[in-house]
Amino acid sequence: MLVAKDLSIGYDRPLIKGIKFELTSPALVQVIGPNSVGKTTLLRTLSGLLKPLEGKVLIEGIDVSGNPKLAGRYISFTPQLTTNQVNDYPITVWEFLNYGLELGGIKVSHDEVIEVLDVVGIDKKFWNVDLRKLSGGYRQKVNIARALLSKSPILILDEPFSNIDIVSKSHIAKVLLKLSKEKLIIVSMHDPTLLLEGTTNIIILGYGKHAFGDPLKILNFDVLKQFYGDSVIIVDKCKHIIDTH
């Protein structure tokens, strides 16, 4: 179980105040909200990478607040993929997964790497390709493969669908939905519909406000209007968020 106890988080000043929730595993939890409201800040805090200004993050009753080494025993964090996020040194997919994890003290077998590469949909012809030559979609698949090989019970992913093609989005969505039946998956999203069918709870953040609940509670027009304002429109009885990314 991951528990956020009255968290106030941010850098010089709090972006989010007094947020609290309890997440059990297995589950798929989405973090949504407009730009610059603290979604990444919240995920980094839950991962132990950022110490909360107030409150605690507990995993199985252990305080991991601001302690990435301790939190890393339970959590694998995959940051947002940016358009210029490429290693400045040559390393192949295979080397990145094998030796990169080994440097972090995680040993994986040859068969485990092959199995995970198959799960995330990376064809054998790409195994020895330089990461710098891969598309954004394939680099994101590699990042998710690395998270899986860490064998962490909790996966936290920041915008895993940004800067990737439609085909890769569909495949990664299927992978995450399947994994959510075994692990606790926490993922920040701009389009909650991509993973909606498997989502158990949603954390919605706004400017100075937040809410937590199941999709039916959060994804109704009145709640979305409170957090997104005029960026929420209804077309043919369907709600659309037109917040730009």
Image (cartoon, rainbow, N blue to C red):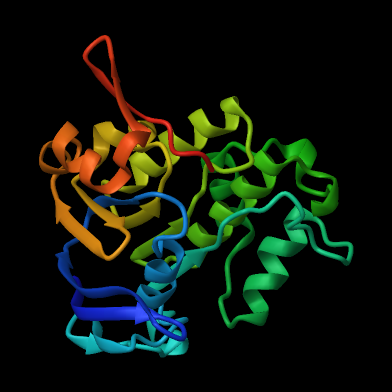
From this viewpoint, is residue 59 visible?
no
Residue occupying image coordinates x 39% and y 32%: 194
Residue 90: image location, x then y, percent: 89, 62
From this viewpoint, is residue 242 visible?
yes
In the displayed structure, does residue 112 sit left or right of residue 13?
Answer: right
In the displayed structure, does residue 82 sit left or right of residue 43?
Answer: right
- Give the residue at the far top of this rendering: 236
Of the 4 image quadrants, the one containing the C terminus is top right
- Vertical position of residue 28 compared to residue 43: above or below: above
- Vertical position of residue 182 compared to residue 194: above or below: below
Residue 125: image location, x then y, percent: 79, 37
In this rendering, the count of numbered labels is: 0
Residue occupying image coordinates x 16% and y 56%: 212
- Vertical position of residue 43 compared to residue 231: above or below: below
Residue 57: image location, x then y, percent: 26, 81
- Vertical position of residue 27 compared to residue 191: above or below: below
Residue occupying image coordinates x 34% and y 65%: 154
Which residue is nearer to you in this view: 242 or 154? 242
Residue occupying image coordinates x 67% and y 62%: 97
Which residue is nearer to you in this view: 236 or 69? 236
Residue 202: image location, x then y, percent: 23, 49
Of the 4 image quadrants, the one containing the N terminus is bottom left
Which residue is nearer to you in this view: 223 or 55? 223
